[in-house]
Image (cartoon, grey):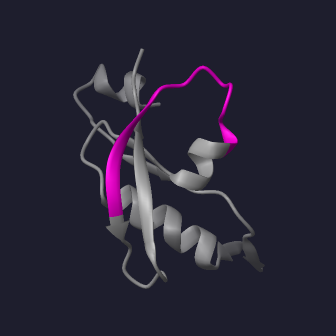
Amino acid sequence: MGDTLAAIDVAIRAGVHTGEVEVRGEQIGGLTVHIGARVAALGEGGDLLVSSTVKELMAGSGLTFRDQGEHVLKGVPGSWRIYAVERE
């Protein structure tokens, strides 16, 4: 999606986390969704950032990750190591 939009000079950022999601009618919510949004907020246009949970689950995928350091995510307990997915 990012590459396609870059062709028309639109840069997006995305944050990915995985975990249990609360279904609230037609909406979703809960801590997992909140963490994903906070991870995305750390990025800039063109960034794809992931939590350490996602990085660990992607072992063997062939993706390359660049460490972005530890971050405190507003409204989330503890600190979280964040990674950027490297483009090929």
Vertical arrangement, residue 25 with respect to residue 64, above or below: below
Specify start and end residues of the magenta stretch as a single range.
57-70
Is 60 part of what is drawn in magenta? Answer: yes
Residue 8 falls in image quadrant: top left
Residue visible at 41% across and 67% down in the picture: 38
Q: Nearer the viewer, residue 70 or 2?
A: 70
Count numbered badges in the picture. 0
Measured as percent of width and height from the top left, residue 67 is found at 36, 42
**Residue that appears at 30% across and 25% down:** 6
Q: In x, y percent, where is residue 1?
A: 47, 31
- Is residue 26 positioned above or below 87 on the image? below
Quick check: 21 left or right of 88?
right
Which one is nearer the viewer's eye here, 22 or 76? 76
Location of the C terminus by quadrant is: top left
Asked if residue 43 is positioned above or below residue 29 in the image, the reply reads: above
User: Left or right: where does residue 7 sit relative to residue 32?
Assistant: left
Question: Which residue is located at x 58 percent, y 69 percent?
Answer: 33
Q: Is residue 1 left or right of residue 67?
A: right
Residue 51 at x, y = what percent? Answer: 51, 54
Which residue, as the protein is rendered here, is positioned at the far top? 88
- Please report the residue visible at 30 percent of the width from the left and 58 percent of the height from the top: 42
Q: Is residue 13 left or right of residue 21?
A: left
Nearer to the camera, 46 or 10: 46
